[in-house]
Amino acid sequence: MVSGAIALAFVPLLISLLIRYRFYFVLFYRAVLLRWVQDFNTGLSREERVYEYVLTHATAGDPENILDTFDNWSSNIEFISHIGPKKGLVLDRLLKELCPMTVLELGTHCGYTTVRIARALPLGARLYSVEMDERNARVAEKIIRMAGFDEDTVELIVRPSDEVIPRLREDFGIERLDFVFMDHWKRCYRPDLRALEDSGLLGDGSVVMADNVVFPGAPSFLRHVRQCGLYEHRIHRAALEYIPGIRDGMAELVFRGIK
């Protein structure tokens, strides 16, 4: 009787926690549990599953339709982490304002944001997208080419970012990066930003945008940005892609050099 009474006393607390953190439980279910089940049932990775869905439901050569198909899959079938449509609008507006000619993306994943960036670039611009996972890169390559972007517009580099950044000038002839988008491992944000600073490829007005700096978060990256004095910066507050109850944000940095 005593143990039963103690258990009942914890029921209100449990209910309160479930209500308070319900969106995190939803994320855990969609991003972890459901993924495990589908990996086991299909023998495919989540990225391969979204590619099959896009292949059978989207129109080849139509980037907008491909992005919409991605969004439908991510909203209604399985969660997958990429910038998504709402934060994507912030990215779209910034690219329209900047009209960058040389763009670096760190973290291609399955190609969603790559397509989103490529479709907004001016004629003659080039996007270099870096992905360290070969299996994901194979999926991304198919998505990017399906959207209609050839190697003259989007070059996919399958190597770790810390190997690529120091050799961008030597291997790809890049003299300046107009825009950098970070959406890879959050622990890599700070060291990769430092590597970009050391490379000399960031010029006055070069813009770096980093996703998910609030959730799951990149505190050492943000601390460096605030303390180094090299950037004008702001945080675009938003919700986590496809999970509206979890707060997130993107950092926008404008490189100004040593003051």
Image (spheres, rainbow, N blue to C red):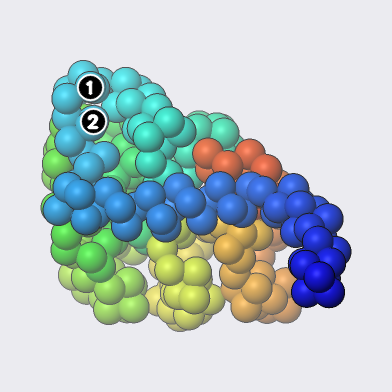
Q: Which residue is drawn at 30% across and 52% down?
A: 37
143 to 256, vertically: above or below: above
Front residue of this view, candidates 32 and 204: 32
Residue 54's label in the rendered image is: 2
Q: Residue at x 65, y 73 (%)?
A: 219
Residue 121 placement (x, y as % from top left): 37, 35
Q: Can residue 91 be seen in this view?
A: no
Residues marked 2 and 1 touching at CB (< 8 Å):
yes
Residue type pointed to by label 1: His
Residue at point 65%, 59% (across, down): 214
Residue 10's x, y, as percent?
80, 64
Instruction: Tell me if residue 248 comes above or below residue 186 in the rendering.
Output: above
**SS type, badge 1:** helix
Residue on which the image places disc 1: 57
- For image coordinates 69% across by 76% down, the residue present is 223
Q: Which of 46 and 249 is in front in this view?
A: 46
Q: In which quarter of the image is residue 76?
A: top left
Taking the image as shown, residue 140 lies to the left or right of residue 192, namely left
Instruction: Say which of 127 and 56 sits in front.
Output: 56
Q: Distance between the residues labelled 2 and 1?
A: 5 Å
- Label total for image: 2
Q: Kindly indicate the quadrant of the structure image that contains residue 175.
A: bottom left
- Residue 123 in view in this figure: yes
Report the quarter where the N terminus lies: bottom right
**Relative horizontal placement of residue 134, taking residue 179 as reference (left or right):** left
